[in-house]
Structures are given as C-alpha cells and as structure tokens.
Image: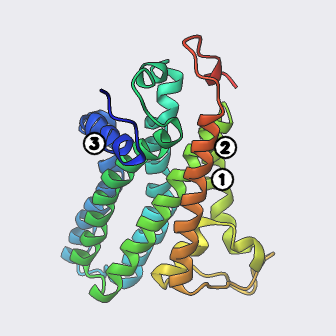
C-alpha cells in the first residue's frame, strides 16, 4: 500500500529527487554570482596594497552593500527562482510530478528550499571572504544574516511573481534592480517596502549616505535588526504560502495552458 502523502514526505522526496540539479550548470552559476565578486575584491585589494594604497573598511562596505546586496543577491534570485516550480510549468513536466501522490501546494516551497540552502552556503562563504579582506569579525554574523534573510524573502517573492504573472521574472527584476535602490530618496514609509532598507538595518551599516543637498533626499530611517529579520522571515513565509495556494488553484494539464497566463 502506498503511504499517504504528508508535508514531511513531500518535502523529503523533493529534496532527495532534485538535489542533483543543484550540481548542474545553473547551480554553479549561482555559486559564482556571489563568490566571484569577493574573489575579484581579493585581487583588487592585493594590487592596491602592492601600490601602497588603502583597501579598508569603507571599500569592504562598498563591496558588501553595492556589489553583494544590491547587485549579486538580486541576480542570484533571478537565476535561482525560475529553476523552481515555474520551470516545471513551462517545460510541461509538472503533470509528471503529480502522477505520484503529492501535495501540490508544497511543491514551490520544496524546490525553493533546495535553492535557498544551496545559495545560502555560498552567501556565507562570500561573507567569510569579507573577513579575509579585513572586515571586522564582529560584523560578519549580521552581514551573513542580512543576506540570508533577504535571500529567503526575495526567493519567495520571485517564486510568487513567476506563478502569478507570465513575465514575473521581468517584474521581479524591475523591483529588485530599479525600485529597491531608490530607497535613498524615499520618505520613511516607502523605505520600509524595499529589501535594501532591512538589509542595511540588519547589517548595521549603509553603502552610501544621502547628503542634505541632494534633490528629494529623505531622512534615512532604520529598523531594529531583530525586527528586520522577523519581517524578512514572515514575508518569505507569506510568499511561499501564496505560491502554494496559487499552484493548488491552477489547473495543471499536459496542454500547458497554465504556463501561458
């Protein structure tokens, strides 16, 4: 007799069945996206120090905020999220997954959990690399927590967008790469609906500041870091739950019309 599907069995089967996909090209591209900037920073720091020039805390913060948080992390999300449930919809493979007993609403989370774990390993490795560049060791745990919590929330957000909109990846890219950096000129309440605001609040630092002479510049607010982490965690849970609900209510068939709108 086939065992009844439970959330634990569904997640376990997904983790076991899809793990080899992480070791394919997309998985290593995800790793390079977050590791390569720090590796290049090591090279740049070596050159500058050989020329008796400084590569100090200000430059390390620039690498963290401007490169990792504002560029590498969004690109990582944009690469990893389509490898989840949206790929099965577009390639018409989801009906084959559902031929075995499974709880459809858990599929987006189960596949997303794999990519979160894989990306999280390389995020931690990158932050550890910042320590090798000379970052204060006391700041590394909060830097890692900021990127991990943001990755959790952004990956869930992108998964939900990809299930709701045909071009969800495009809308997500516009949000992460255009809307989010505008945090510098947003009034307080609008700052709170950007990912970067919470990343900076958790890390306890900013990549840049807004001068009072800048047009439209607003006072930069902050959120206590435990609360910022909680916001990321709850927002991610909400997005994964909404993704599961969307998939559960989407007609799945071999014709593939569910992937067209």
Q: Up-down: is 42 above or below 100?
A: below
Q: Nearer the viewer, residue 37 or 101?
A: 101
**Residue ID for mark 2:** 171
Q: Nearer the viewer, residue 53 or 76?
A: 76
Q: CA distance from mark 2 to mark 3?
A: 25 Å
Q: CA distance from mark 2 to mark 1?
A: 6 Å
Q: Is residue 54 left or right of residue 186?
A: left
Q: Up-down: is 234 above or below 159?
A: below
Say if mark 2 contacts mark 3, CB within 8 Å. Answer: no
Residue 207 visible, this orientation: no
Q: Up-down: is 59 above or below 13?
A: below
Q: Nearer the viewer, residue 177 or 166?
A: 166
**Sequence-wise first label, 2 or 3:** 3
Badge 3 crowding class, 10 Å Cα cut-off, few under 14, some 14 to 19, many 20 or more, is: some
Badge 2 crowding class, 10 Å Cα cut-off, few under 14, some 14 to 19, many 20 or more, is: some
Say if mark 2 contacts mark 1, CB within 8 Å. Answer: yes
Quadrant housing the N terminus: top left
Q: Which element is circle 3 on?
A: helix
Residue 241 visible, this orientation: yes
Image coords of residue 140 (percent x, y): 32, 80
Q: Which element is circle 1 on?
A: helix
**Residue ID for mark 3:** 28
């Amino acid at each position: 007799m086939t065992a009844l599907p439970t959330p634990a069995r569904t997640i376990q089967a997904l983790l076991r069945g899809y793990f080899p996909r992480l070791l394919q090209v997309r998985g290593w591209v995800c790793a390079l996206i977050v590791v390569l900037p720090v590796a290049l920073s090591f090279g740049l720091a070596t050159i500058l120090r050989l020329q008796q020039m400084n590569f100090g805390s200000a430059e390390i913060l620039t690498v963290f905020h401007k490169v990792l948080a504002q560029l590498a992390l969004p690109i990582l999300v944009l690469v990893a999220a389509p490898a989840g449930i949206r790929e099965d919809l577009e390639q018409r493979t989801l009906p084959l997954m559902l031929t075995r007993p499974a709880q459809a609403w858990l599929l987006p989370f189960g596949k997303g959990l794999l990519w979160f774990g894989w990306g999280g390993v390389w995020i931690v490795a990158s932050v550890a690399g910042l320590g090798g560049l000379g970052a204060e060791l006391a700041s590394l745990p909060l830097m890692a927590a900021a990127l991990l919590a943001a990755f959790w929330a952004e990956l869930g957000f992108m998964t939900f967008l990809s299930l709701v909109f045909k071009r969800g990846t495009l809308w997500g890219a516009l949000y992460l790469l255009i809307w989010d950096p505008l945090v510098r000129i947003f009034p307080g309440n609008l700052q709170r609906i950007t990912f970067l605001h919470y990343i900076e609040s958790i890390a306890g630092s900013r990549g840049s500041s807004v001068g009072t002479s800048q047009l439209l510049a607003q006072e930069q607010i902050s959120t206590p870091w435990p609360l910022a982490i909680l916001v990321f965690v709850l927002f991610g849970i909400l997005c994964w739950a909404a993704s599961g609900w969307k998939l559960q209510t989407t007609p799945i068939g071999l014709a593939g019309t569910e992937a067209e709108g």
